[in-house]
Image (tube, rainbow, N blue to C red):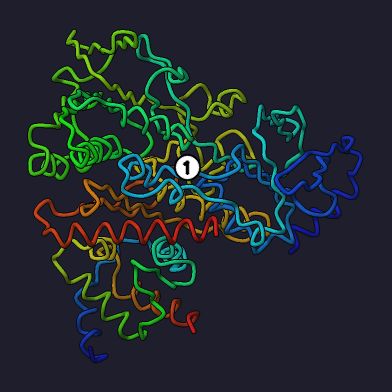
Amino acid sequence: MKKLNNYRRNFLKNSGYLISSLLLSSIFKINISYAKSKLKPRIIIVGFGIGGATCISYLLKFSKNFDIIVIEKNERIQTCPMSNLVIADIIPYSYISHDFDYMRLKNIKFLNSSVKKIYTSKKIIETEESSKIYYDYLILSPGINFKNDIDGYNHKDKSIVPHCWDGTKNIFKFKKRLNDLEKKSTIIISAPDYPYRCPPAPYERASLLANFLKRKKKKFKILILDSKDSFTKKEIFLNEWRNYHRESIEWISKSKGGKITYFNKKENYVKTSNGSKFKADFINIIPNQKAADILTISKLNGNKDWCEVNPMTFELKNFRNIFVVGDSIDAGDMPKSAFSANSQAKILASNLVNRIYEKDLLNPVFLNTCYSFSSSKRAFSITSWYKLNKKKTRIVSLGSSTTNVDALSHQYFDETRQAYGWYENLVKTLYG
Amino acid sequence: MKKSKYFISLMLFPFHIFADDIEINVIIENCKSCHGQNYEGNNYIKSLKTLEKEEFISKMIKYINSNNDHVMSRISKVLNKKDILKIAEEIYEKVE
């Protein structure tokens, strides 16, 4: 408590730093003063996705000691995990769409807005309504942004098949376009280059689209045009396609001409790096990715695609008291996944509290388990523990392992149950 | 499984992959991702609350010993006897 008491005393001594208060509307209609908090350190969390919500779940028990504000642009959370199952009509949309549990979060202020800019020298964030809010500690869990590095492609273009890689309601538009396909069609799915959110998901999507179209008794061919020469769980995916979609899914690696360089939306074709041209009825480009816009606009990622953080604390390099978690960071060997973000956020929140109370920091270990489905009855996973290197500057893998490609059907089915089990416990903890 | 049996099994795993300065609670927080905040499980993952402490330890030993690729077998491979006993201590101290 020593640090906290010091904080209060210091603040009261220096209370000259007050900006006139402004009332902001929130989900709760709570009035938030943007002035520096008089009694408690203020922690602002931007983004209520998996990373942000995990931080909140860990900070909840300290909510009387801290002034906690959450800023989230959406009124509901739609998770990326399990979204390919929604696309394939295996589970309903409601399964991945979550309300906020206001009762559980009653000591936390919610602001339904997004952050336009961060002024690090003044420790102020500016919301889209141009309101400014002071922070003592800022946690950013903003997701990702997309690159427009394919000639002719713009990820914001509403007339094309949405990438469906960002947890938005575009999933309905994607499903409609899929449902509208004729009885015989060609589909292209482009797989981005590393690093990107949820590495096995393009291949899971191909598997589940094939599964969906088969159930609809439609004839189809899915081409996966890849910007890479290999991918996670490759052996299992290839085996699943051989066994269940022999003629209907084809993977074309980068070295075989899979990397898309040009997209023609009017005539529905793409060209790849070796000059090959592929025409299709449904082109789902999953673009290359980078850190969320707010980090670039506020110059927090040093002109790099991903933010560099101290993996003990997730504090941004060169920016004290600003922490980033989840898909926008360079997490060393850890993939960008919901499981990873959840594991990282636990350390972030715990060590932030330890820092505020001047306690020793925890030495982290992280876990990632990433499930992929190839049908409603078959799933498989990759799992790995991670720790820090000796210098404690980088997250390193202790070695990953996957489901055995020769696993029996009941083992693949068991993994579907484990995937649902993980997801349901995760969202119950985070969203109630 | 009798106590003596699982202690013998534990002796087979002297390898400690985590550093000694890693607190067991940090490992356990990762278990909660699947097993629930209070290890309550759900329709798909059994509650750890329904197990006795010794049963939990013996199951963990089985996972480590097993050559199958069950997710728990793969996840628990990095743990050693000290870790498992400490985890059991923590979980069953807190579970009523």
Question: In terms of secondary structure, where does tag 1 sit?
Answer: loop
Left or right: where does residue A330 sit relative to residue A85? right
Instruction: State how many labels appear.
Output: 1
In the rendered structure, the answer to whether residue A59 lies left or right of residue A34 reads: left
Q: Kindly identify the amino acid type of the residue bearing the numbered disc 1.
A: Gly
Give the residue at x 47% y 57%. A363
Looking at the picture, tell me which residue is in the foreground, A70 or A392. Answer: A70
Residue A316, picture quadrant:
top right
Task: Residue A4 in the image: state x and y as whole percent.
Answer: 76, 58
Q: The C terminus of chain A is located in which quarter? A: bottom right
Q: Nearer the viewer, residue A123 or A54?
A: A54
Q: In percent of the image, x 46 and y 63: which residue is there?
A: B29
For image coordinates 33% across by 66% down, the residue present is B44
Q: Position of residue A158 (x, y in %)?
A: 46, 19
Would you place residue B8 above or below residue A183 in this image?
A: below
The percent coordinates of residue A66 (x first, y second) are: 73, 55
Q: Residues within 10 Å of mark 1 (few under 14, many from 20)?
A: many
- Report the residue marked by disc 1: A326
Residue at the image position 79 percent from the left and 38 percent from the top = A24
The N terminus of chain A lies in quadrant:
bottom right
Residue A386 image point, x, y percent: 35, 52
Is residue A288 positioned above or below A205 on the image?
above
Horizontal placement of A169 versus A15: left or right?
left
Task: Give the answer, above or below, for where A373 lies relative to A143.
Answer: below
Image mark 1: chain? A
Depth check, front residue: A348 or A387 = A348
